[in-house]
Image (cartoon, grey):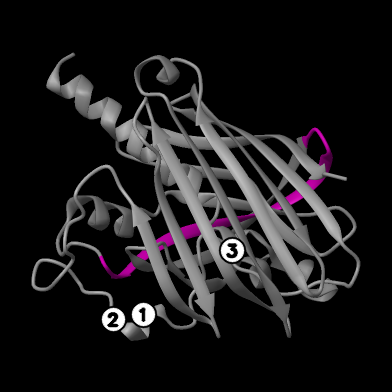
């Protein structure tokens, strides 16, 4: 394979990993006392070619929540760069805010040992980070890197806990109130903000759901843990061609992603829904 081909394959693998995790980069608040179970399934395509599938399940009430999800390569990419990942998060809901307690994510490429991250929270702060990698981890210290400081680990959310977007009934009818928000995220190594902005309202029809979705522009804002002047970080921060579509779950004013679209200079990643609805 040529260097160009190898670079494209590596970009797709890395892009798919980032893309699947992007499904987990949204905010949350609170809901009713009744327990709800939701499932979303997606087909992931790059430049119109299927490269993966992803599913996540959400269980929540007004006291606690849990999320589990998985994604794997499919189609042609499965032959040259097979990979799979799982995530899980759990915590409590207090006064319309999620309080994460535990988050884990594991990714396996080809026949390599799984790489994993585990985050533990206490009193809205990250108190323990465990990372298992097949490669020697780089020390992310100044001046090459923006170091992660103690202040960066307070009042943050793990990526998966941001799947729920509950609102009161009145706000749920206003796409700007759903989308126009900014949220702090820590993934185990890097600290960044996700800023959403309302763009439009679109009709959506898939198995389990027929209705509308709010189209939110997504912006990635690096805060700490990243390498200074790194090209990939700069390109993500400057990318204005990323969208997350949010739709309400059945019978509640709680939103979750129903479609994701991320444009790159090589092509577009799109996660289209194959199912969106009750998991009970």
Relative depth, front residue between 1 and 206: 1
Task: Indicate the quadrant where residue 98 lies.
Answer: bottom right
Residue name at image x 26 percent, y 67 percent:
225
Label 3 Cα crowd, 10 Å radius (few <14 / some 14-19 / many 20+): many
Label 2 Cα crowd, 10 Å radius (few <14 / some 14-19 / many 20+): few
Q: Are marks 1 and 3 in contact (CB under 8 Å)?
A: no
| N-term mark: 3 or 2 | 2
Residue 211 lies in the magenta-colored region: yes
Element carrying mark 1: helix
Q: Nearer the viewer, mark 3 or mark 2?
A: 2
- Residue beneath disc 3: 162
Task: Indicate the quadrant where residue 94 lies.
Answer: bottom right
Going by the image, does 77 lie left or right of 204? left
Main secondary-structure element of the magenta-colored stretch:
strand
Q: Which quarter of the image is occupied by the N terminus?
A: top left
Residue name at image x 32 percent, y 54 percent:
236
Residues in magenta, as a range: 206-225
Relative depth, front residue between 151 and 165: 151
Q: Which quarter of the image is occupied by the C terminus?
A: top right
What separation in Å lies between label 1 and label 3 (alpha carbons)?
17 Å
What separation in Å lies between label 1 and label 2 (alpha carbons)?
5 Å
Please state the horizontal and vertical placement of residue 125, each as a whole percent of the image. Answer: 48, 81
Residue 278 lies in the magenta-colored region: no
What separation in Å lies between label 3 and label 2 (alpha carbons)?
22 Å
Label 1 Cα crowd, 10 Å radius (few <14 / some 14-19 / many 20+): many
- Residue beneath disc 1: 152
- Residue beneath disc 2: 149
Residue name at image x 24 percent, y 50 percent:
232
Task: Indicate the quadrant where residue 62 lies.
Answer: bottom right
Please state the horizontal and vertical placement of residue 183, each as a whole percent of the image. Answer: 50, 72
């Amino acid at each position: 394979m040529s260097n160009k081909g190898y670079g494209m394959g590596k970009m797709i693998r890395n892009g798919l990993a980032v893309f699947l995790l992007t499904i987990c980069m949204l905010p949350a608040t609170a809901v009713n006392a009744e327990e709800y179970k939701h499932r979303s399934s997606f087909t992931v395509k790059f430049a119109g070619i299927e490269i993966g599938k992803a599913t996540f399940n959400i269980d929540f009430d007004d006291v606690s929540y849990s999320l589990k999800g998985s994604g794997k390569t499919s189609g042609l990419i499965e032959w040259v760069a097979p990979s799979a990942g799982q995530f899980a998060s759990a915590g409590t809901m207090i006064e319309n805010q999620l309080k994460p307690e535990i988050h884990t994510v594991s990714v396996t490429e080809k026949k390599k040992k799984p790489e994993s991250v585990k985050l533990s929270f206490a009193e809205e702060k990250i108190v323990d980070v465990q990372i298992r990698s097949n490669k020697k981890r780089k020390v992310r210290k100044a001046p090459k890197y923006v170091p992660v400081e103690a202040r960066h680990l307070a009042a943050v959310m793990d990526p998966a806990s941001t799947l729920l977007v509950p609102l009161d009934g009145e706000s749920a009818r206003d796409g700007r109130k759903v989308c126009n928000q900014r949220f702090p995220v820590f993934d185990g190594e890097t600290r960044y903000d996700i800023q959403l902005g309302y763009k439009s309202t679109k009709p959506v029809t898939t198995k389990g759901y027929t209705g509308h979705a709010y189209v939110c522009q997504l912006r990635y804002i690096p805060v700490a843990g990243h390498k200074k002047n790194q090209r990939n970080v700069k390109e993500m921060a400057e990318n204005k061609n990323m969208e997350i579509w949010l739709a309400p779950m059945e019978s509640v004013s709680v939103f979750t992603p129903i479609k994701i679209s991320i444009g790159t200079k090589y092509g577009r990643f799109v996660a289209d829904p194959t199912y969106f609805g009750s998991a009970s």
